[in-house]
Image (cartoon, helix red, strand yellow):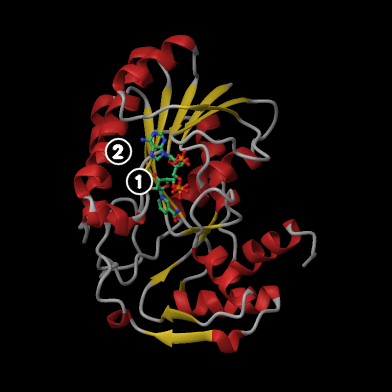
């Protein structure tokens, strides 16, 4: 199988590449011109907003399947620059979905838990959507565009993801908290926003299972434990032997300047478990795996 993954320097793509089950050929595309280290993919640069460039890539290389994860994934960046967020996320999705249909590739579109308002957890795949901010609304439009424009496809909604990211890319809550505590900095963490966080390797395994089975429809991808960011911080400190006294427990009213976050988007993982056969990882397992990957051991 030859697979294209867009957004190949992101956290999701790193988990996807690191869990590849065998000798699949992986081509990765990303925007900026730098080389991702330790990658198992053959990387190229491509701007998914550029429809002609996307079409050229699909004419040069034949892909059996495509995972489309590229775009602006920062909620606050999209909130500040919604038109930029729309061009990147919706424009890119239209270009990739159309190319998949034209060239006969199966598409997995990567959406988000931010399509929910967080008032009625746990969220199943058929729960009504109601995004609170620009990013959530644009990603919902992307889901609809992917479903309309692509041929055979599935849509996944990962929840808050963690794992070791490429150093050139943005940190995630776990690596951010880890770095802060390591350097002895105080960290304010909210105790009123909840998710069941997803390790990027578990996400990768679910994506590979989807590529093997080629189902259609929606899949929620999440871990086993529902935690607030504050509780997540405590687990990070405990796992890596860092000073939990540096963690300050606050609520969301402390951050009036950022986009409103849904309070509790905890996912039901029933479909992921039953139809993909992927077990949700506990936080202890996921953080333990990160620690082991540092050579410290669990
Ligand atoms: N991280 C999470 O917690 C989370 C949760 C739910 C859903 N998701 C979804 O999962 C997907 C991947 O997220 P992530 O956290 O892995 O992303 P990320 O770490 O922020 O990386 C974004 C990736 O997209 C690439 N990119 C951005 N604009 C592009 C463009 N115009 N053309 C081509 N590539 C472009 C970036 O390339 P450069 O490095 O070259 O700039 C990078 O490879 C996103 O669709 C996001 O909405 C993520």
Asked whether, in this view, residue 88 is left or right of residue 43, the answer is left
Mark toward the start of the polypeptide (2 vs 1): 1
Q: Looking at the figure, which quarter contains the C terminus?
A: bottom right
Q: Quadrant of residue 254?
A: bottom left
Residue 128 picture location, percent across and down: 22, 55
Asked whether, in this view, residue 283 is left or right of residue 148, the answer is right
Is residue 136 visible in the rendered image? The answer is no
Do the residues under discs 2 and 1 have CB atoms within 8 angstroms? yes
Residue marked by disc 2? 88
Q: Secondary structure at mark 2?
A: helix
For image coordinates 31% across by 55% down, the residue present is: 77
**Which residue occupies the extreme front position in the image?**
33
For image coordinates 74% across by 59% down, the residue present is: 294
Residue marked by disc 1? 72
Is residue 215 visible in the rendered image? The answer is yes
* Distance CA(mark 2)–CA(mark 1): 6 Å
Q: In the depicted view, which residue is nearer to us: 55 or 231?
A: 55
Asked whether, in this view, residue 140 is left or right of residue 101, the answer is left
Q: Looking at the figure, which quarter contains the N terminus?
A: top right
- Say how many tags the image has: 2
Q: In the depicted view, which residue is nearer to us: 84 or 93?
A: 84
Residue 59 picture location, percent across and down: 42, 10
For image coordinates 53% across by 66% down, the residue present is: 176
Q: Relative to residue 239, is residue 37 depicted above or below?
A: above
Q: Is mark 2 within 8 Å of ligand 1?
A: yes
């Amino acid at each position: 199988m030859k697979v294209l993954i867009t957004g190949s320097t992101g956290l999701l793509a790193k988990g996807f590449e690191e869990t590849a089950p065998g000798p699949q050929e992986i081509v990765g595309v990303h925007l900026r011109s730098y080389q991702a280290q330790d990658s198992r993919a053959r990387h190229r640069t491509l701007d998914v907003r550029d429809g002609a460039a996307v079409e050229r890539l699909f004419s040069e290389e034949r892909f059996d399947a495509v995972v489309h994860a590229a775009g602006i994934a920062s909620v606050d960046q999209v909130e500040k620059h919604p038109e930029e967020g729309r061009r990147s996320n919706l424009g890119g999705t239209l270009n990739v979905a159309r190319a998949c249909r034209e060239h006969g590739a199966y598409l997995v579109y990567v959406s988000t838990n931010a399509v929910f308002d967080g008032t009625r957890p746990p969220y199943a795949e058929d729960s009504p959507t109601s995004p609170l901010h620009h990013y959530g609304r644009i990603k919902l439009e992307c889901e609809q565009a992917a479903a309309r424009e692509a041929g055979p496809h599935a849509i996944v909604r990962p929840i808050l993801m963690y794992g070791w990211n490429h150093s050139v890319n943005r940190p995630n809550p776990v690596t951010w908290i880890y770095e802060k505590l390591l350097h002895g900095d105080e960290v304010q963490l909210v105790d009123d926003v909840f998710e069941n966080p997803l390790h990027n390797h578990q996400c990768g395994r679910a994506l590979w299972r989807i590529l093997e089975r080629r189902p259609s429809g929606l899949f929620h991808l999440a871990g086993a434990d529902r935690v607030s960011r504050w509780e997540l911080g405590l687990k990070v400190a405990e796992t890596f032997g860092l000073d939990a006294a540096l963690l300050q427990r606050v609520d969301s009213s402390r951050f009036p300047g950022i986009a409103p976050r849904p309070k509790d988007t905890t996912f039901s993982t029933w479909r992921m478990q039953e139809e993909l056969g992927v077990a949700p990882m506990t936080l202890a397992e996921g953080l333990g795996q990160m620690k082991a990957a540092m050579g410290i051991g669990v």
